[in-house]
Amino acid sequence: MFSSDMAAALKARWKLIVAVLIATLVLAGIWLTTVQRTYVATASLLFDDRGPNPALQDNPQQQDDRSMLGTQADIIRSDAVARRVARNERLVRHPELRTRWLEEGKGEGSFENWIVTDLLAHLEVAPEKDTNVLAVRFRASDPTFAARMANSFARNFVTMRLQISTDTAKQYATWFQSRTDEVRRNLEAAQAKVTDFQRSHGLIDGNVLALESDRLNALSGQLANAESSAADLRSRAGSRVSESPDVQQTAVVGMLRQQIAANDAKVSQLAATHGDSHPLLVAARSELDVLRARLASETSAASQSVRVASSAAATREAQLSGLVAQQRARMMQMTGYQSQLEALQNDVATAQKAYDNVTQRLNLMRLQSGLPTTNAQQIDRATAPLLPASPNVPLLLLFATLGGLALGVIAAMLAEWSRPLVRTAGGLIDATGVPVVGSFNFAPFRHGRAHAVGGM
């Protein structure tokens, strides 16, 4: 066969090419009908970081998205989820699975364990690119069963995740409840200590320290006045108290001095005019002696009064000084009591803070234990796939078509080589080396005439 006749040969033997193509497609179709098909159903799970999780509100540090998705994928592939799927779907009653178990496992071991292993062998969990979505894929020969298992894995994972979260929250709630009782008792004990201390030390009124300070200031003022008064009285009640103005300026002493001066003048006058034995002079001198004696008595009484006042002022000063000292000691004692009371009140504040924190955590755990959902939810349900994942029917048909065409071309070329024919003028020139003078079309006549198709 010559290269110039290739296109004409293939065109002439198109039926052979088509026959080989059809035969190839038929064989591919027969193989597709006999080979075991594997279907893959996919369900999608979304993990929303903004989902409600009160237990994590106090903990701003969040897990990395990639590690979080990896952890969740491992949980989906765990035996616990697979067992829940097997039990909830009642796969132990599945006849085909039991038949396979008897054939592959020889009926040895636990049927449920074999189902779990088989389910995990056909399960694939992978995160979608740059998202918080996990794709749950299940492979099976039955498309409906594959979709059923993919949805069951997704559903049971969400259920188990919620159960784990709520069970953990319930356990923490129980612990926090016992802890709440303990811190409540501590708070009540601290409050009782404060109350008993206030009652026993007279600190019921919150302003008691200020009142005691005001009392000390008042006593200090009184003591200062008493000291000043006592010092003044001591100076006036000295050794010459009788000559002090307090004694000399009294009304009685002043009146007696006037009377004595008048009588003294009278005695001097009588002594000048009468003899010493004259009755008038004797009477005047006697009256003068009486007045002088009375003056001495009154002066002594006034002096004694000054001394008594000075002694009373000193006594008052001593009393006030003692009261001030006692009040200062009481202030020191009350200050110590106040410091102890503040320490006890700090204990109450600490116990109150601990009680509030534990109560808050208890409420959070109770809230989480009653949450109806988690931050994981199924966004896409798996449906029974129309085409198998293995074998790939469109790709196989494409390859069968291309292969059939290639085999048809090869068959046509082999047939042409086994019986070469001159099909074109160029091929004739190549075969004989003689120029072609003309060519004729031997196709059936049209309209009763033959038409020449070429010329010199």
Image (cartoon, rainbow, N blue to C red):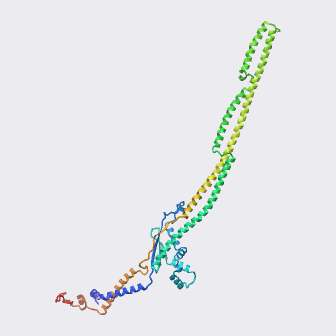
Judge whether 261 appears above or below 351 on screen.
above
Judge whether 340 appears above or below 60 on screen.
above
Image coordinates of residue 364 in percent, x first then y, are: 55, 61
Asked if residue 23 can be seen in this view, the reply is yes
Question: Does residue 31 appear to the left or right of 421 in the view shown?
Answer: right
Asked if residue 409 can be seen in this view, the reply is no
Image coordinates of residue 398 in percent, x first then y, are: 37, 81
Total numbered labels placed on residues in the image: 0
Residue at (51% x, 80% y) in the render: 94
Residue at (27% x, 91% y) in the render: 421
Q: Relative to the observer, which residue lies in front, 361 or 120?
A: 361
Image coordinates of residue 232 in percent, x first then y, are: 70, 28
Residue at (53% x, 75% y) in the render: 88
Q: Relative to the observer, which residue lies in front, 442 or 456?
A: 442
Question: Does residue 338 appear to the left or right of 396 in the view shown?
Answer: right
Judge whether 344 appears above or below 297 on screen.
below
Q: Which residue ends up furthest to the right in the rendered image?
A: 277
Q: Which residue ends up furthest to the bottom in the rendered image?
A: 419
Judge whether 295 appears above or below 39 on screen.
above
- Quadrant, the C terminus: bottom left
Image coordinates of residue 60 in percent, x first then y, are: 52, 60
